[in-house]
Image: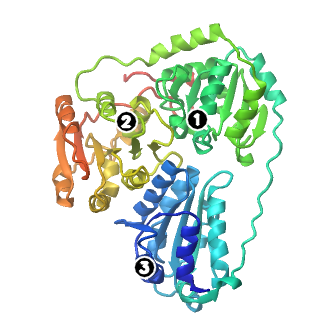
Amino acid sequence: MKRSGAQIVIESLCRNKVKTVFGYPGGAVLPIYDELYKNSHRLNHVLCAHEQNAAHAADGFARVTGKPGVVISTSGPGATNLVTGIANAYLDSVPLVAITGNVAVPLLGKDSFQEVDITGITQPIVKHNFAVSDVKELSGILDAAFEIASSGRPGPVLVDIPKSIQTDVCDESEFVVQELFFNDLPEADLSAAVAAITEAERPLIYSGGGVVASGASEELRTFAERISAPVAFSMMGLTALPAGHPANLGMCGMHGSQSSAKLQSECDLIIALGVRFSDRATGNTAKYKQGKKLIHVDIDLSEINKNTDTDIELCGDVKTVLQKLLVLLPQQFRPQWQKQVSEAKKLDLPPEENSLTPRTLLKTVAKYCEADTVVATDVGQHQMWTMQYFPFRSPRTLLTSGGLGTMGFGLGAAIGGCIANDRERTVLFTGDGSFGMCLQELATAVSQKLPLLIVIFNNGVLGMVRQWQTMFYEQHYSSTTLNRKTDFPALAKAFGAEGKKVTALSELEKALTTLAPDTPTVLDCQLDMDEFVLPMIPPGGSVQDLVTRRN
């Protein structure tokens, strides 16, 4: 059967079990959008307000489902608008397939209207990218894109399709299969790890996004209970164990819990699962590892020994490695270590508060959430408060920008996450600074009739930057006081959403009991600009430098 390139795109998406795509049309993808129109019964296209947010929506969709999200954009500015979203997915290891149009093949390299070398631009921020030059290769390339995006350590793949390729026709018998070559992972030697775990007196598990990506939450729980070890989390790994589990220490690192900081410094063995030891997680790497051994389990060999020296390397899928370790490890009891863990966790008990603060706000919203409620954040103080105080109970319920720290990520991600989660109530915690970067996507949330709860931590400043200016820059508040008169509730209503201003906990409780079932609601919560995210380990510092209160 003969098919055009645009028809091949649709068939490839359906063959790879894609049912929802996000995007924005333009001249260089008109043939593809014409086929989307004809195939609307097979593929749901979500029209976003901006290509960057479309990429974030596909990213959020992928994080919830564990399957590649798909975003489509036109050439030139449409393609370049995807770059931040692609980079965000790359640094957080999210499977994403980005399909861009380009000018016709004869016009490539001639500075044609809306022509950019998008494969060159994105080369450092993708697992792989393809520039299609022959329609016969298109089907195989698209299949390869999905395989690459989801295999091994997940990540984004870009496929650039010139407009002439979309209209070219070929027979299925002429399709060229794209050959893929993956390096085999070395066979992990578990004996040294088993010995180190058995001999340790104070083991601690450091769990990251790789645990969530591999679906190893149940194995993590069993492993922690088997070896009587507490679990500290990177931000990306935070949902792998329910917040109420006795072993859960919460997030570690710069703004992690006091218990995780204390116990990481006191343990004699760190078992790192699917983490990359970023600077925000470790602080001073020399002090971080001082006096302890380190076992590192990761599917990406390049991550091992990259940021810190490893004593025992286990390169492989976290779920598989944990299953093998569990076969070899007997039940271990460490009563003295468990006593230390229990004492350390008392440090995390919050003070009683009755006013509207970041902690009481998050605890109150959490009361109205189910165990599988998807929660998205933007980037800044509200993001760290969410990691500290929101009680996540299920894997794949947190959508946040970890590696890139993208302000504006949240609303697009919440839209994608909500659609992926059968359009159930989805929460976005954002700041007034972050929300200002992406608020046009309210139009998408309204048109899609999504029950988003958008909670703005409105303190009138760029809070995290202001905090650093207070602590490290002699209170030189350069360009962090926003001085904006934006009326967020009125703006929400202008978009067709609901909007309310919240100044007290009682107002918040009332607002949460009257949410519309198929309309976004924006709650503009007024907070003190001088609230700090604490505890905090200063950059380059260690647990000895931990700041727990404002001077």
Q: Horizontal and vertical percent for residue 116?
A: 53, 78
Q: Amino acid at mark 2?
A: Glu
In the rendered image, the residue lying farthest to the bottom is 106
Q: Is residue 272 above or below residue 545?
A: below
What residue is shown with label 3? 38
Q: Is residue 435 left or right of residue 8?
A: left
Spatial separation of the CA atoms under disc 3 and disc 2? 38 Å
Front position in the image: 462 or 156: 156
Q: Residue at x 42, y 39 (%)?
A: 372
Question: Real-space Cα distance between discs 1 and 3?
Answer: 41 Å
**Secondary element at tag 2:** loop
Quadrant of the image containing the N terminus: bottom right
Which residue bears the numbered disc 1?
217
- In the rendered image, residue 158, in percent from the top left (x then y), is placed at 58, 68
- The answer for how far apart the CA atoms under marks 2 and 1 are is 18 Å
Residue that appears at 17% across and 44% down: 500
Spot occupied by residue 268 in the image (x, y as percentages of width and height): 70, 19
- Left or right for 525, reference 404: left
Which image quadrant: the C terminus?
Answer: top left
What residue is at 56 percent from the left and 53 percent from the top? 94
